[in-house]
Image (spheres, rainbow, N blue to C red):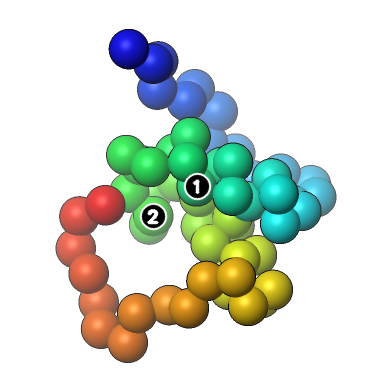
Amino acid sequence: MTLPPTNHDRLPVMTVGCAHLVMQQHINCLLFVCPVKAQAKARLVEDGKMVPANVVHFGY
């Protein structure tokens, strides 16, 4: 059993490696309420490591 992440604040610097880790650690966080997960997704999209969906998904 793992504990949920306790810090959801944006980071001053987000590397691609850090973004991958954040996405794994915050897998159960909702994107629109978790600033660090939103930052990680934006970083991965910016680097071409993730392609956003062309339709809105609800849930995780």
Q: Residue 20: x, y in percent?
A: 59, 49
Q: What residue type is labelled 1?
A: Met
Residue drawn at (59%, 57%), measured in percent from left and top?
39
- Using the image as rendered, state which of residue 12 and residue 60 is in the foreground: 60
Residue drawn at (40%, 22%), measured in percent from left and top?
4
Q: Residue 14: x, y in percent?
A: 74, 52
Q: In this view, does 14 lie to the left or right of 5?
A: right
Q: Residue 6: x, y in percent?
A: 49, 22
Is any part of residue 35 visible from this angle?
Answer: no
Residue drawn at (32%, 39%), measured in percent from left and top?
28
Q: Which residue lies furthest to the left in this view?
A: 58
State which quarter of the image contains the N terminus. Answer: top left
Which of the 4 quarters of the picture holds residue 9? top right
Residue 49 — which label?
none
Using a 10 Å C-alpha cutoff, classify the residue at mark 1 as few (fewer than 14 neighbours), some (14 to 19) or many (20 or more): some
- Using the image as rendered, state which of residue 38 and residue 22 is in the foreground: 22
- Using the image as rendered, state which of residue 2 and residue 36 is in the foreground: 2
Residue 24 in the image: above or below residue 1: below
Residue 5 in the image: above or below residue 30: above
Q: Which amino acid does label 2 sit on?
A: Leu
Mark 2 — residue?
A: 31
Residue 23 — which label?
1
Residue 43 in the image: above or below residue 36: below
